[in-house]
Image (tube, rainbow, N blue to C red):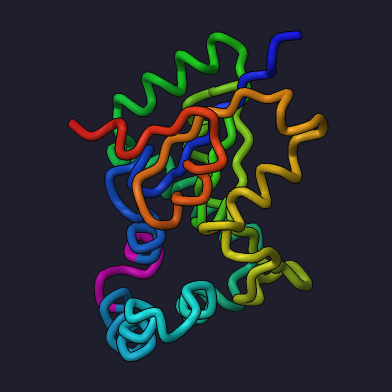
Amino acid sequence: MPKEKIYCFDFDGTITNKDTLLEFIRYARGNAKFFWGFLLFSPLLVLMKLHLYPNYRAKQQLFSWYFKGMTEDEFNELCRHFARDNQDLLRQPAISRLKQIDNAGDRILVVSASIDNWVRPFFDDLELQHVTVVGTQIEISDGRVTGRFLTHNCYGPEKVYRIAALLDKGRNLYDITAFGDSRGDKELLAYADHSFYKPFRR
């Protein structure tokens, strides 16, 4: 019995040429508020870089400062506009590979620490049929962004956990290929049958 093929792609730095969290904040809030926020949170970000403060907590606090209280509709509309206006963030060799896999009818998982609300529209615009976005999800209450994450930050071991949750057959019945570019993809690349590190750099 042939194994089902699944292709897992990291998003930031693998499919894109920049970190989309930073680009999204700059797009949504403008340069002045972008820099002010990072100045305000700089002590926390330094601790995070030194591995003295959890990555997900720093990310959640930063996200909350910029977007807490925004309506869900407003936030999602902003995400759609961001994807539409920033197609140049996509690495063309990565897009070519995605289209090749999609045309073959194989399953694609885009597994990202970024918020899936702004990751997904990039693939809607590309009209890919077999892509599932597995990202960090945000909490919505009474139609507004609370600033909290609904899921764990989809980074490191969490990527493997989230992929495994989508496999309804035994792991040995899947042939998994993974593409990544950073420390946050280490576990994903180890989990896959075939791994590619920084494959789309020119």
Q: Quadrant of residue 140?
A: bottom right
User: How many numbered dots are placed on residues in this image?
Assistant: 0
Residue 106 magenta-highlighted = no
Q: Quadrant of residue 154?
A: bottom right
**Residue sitting nearer the eye, 158 or 81:** 158
Image: magenta residue range? 26-32
The x and y percentages for residue 101 are 51, 17
Residue 29 magenta-highlighted = yes
The x and y percentages for residue 44 are 38, 87
Report the side of 134 relative to 126 (left or right). right
Give the vertical position of 22 relative to 176 (above or below).
below
Quadrant containing the C terminus in the rendered view? top left
Extreme left residue here?
202
Extreme right residue here?
168
Give the vertical position of 105 relative to 169 (above or below).
above
**Residue sitting nearer the eye, 7 or 70:** 7
The x and y percentages for residue 4 are 68, 18
Residue sitting at 53 percent across and 10 percent down? 103
**Residue sitting nearer the eye, 182 or 154:** 182
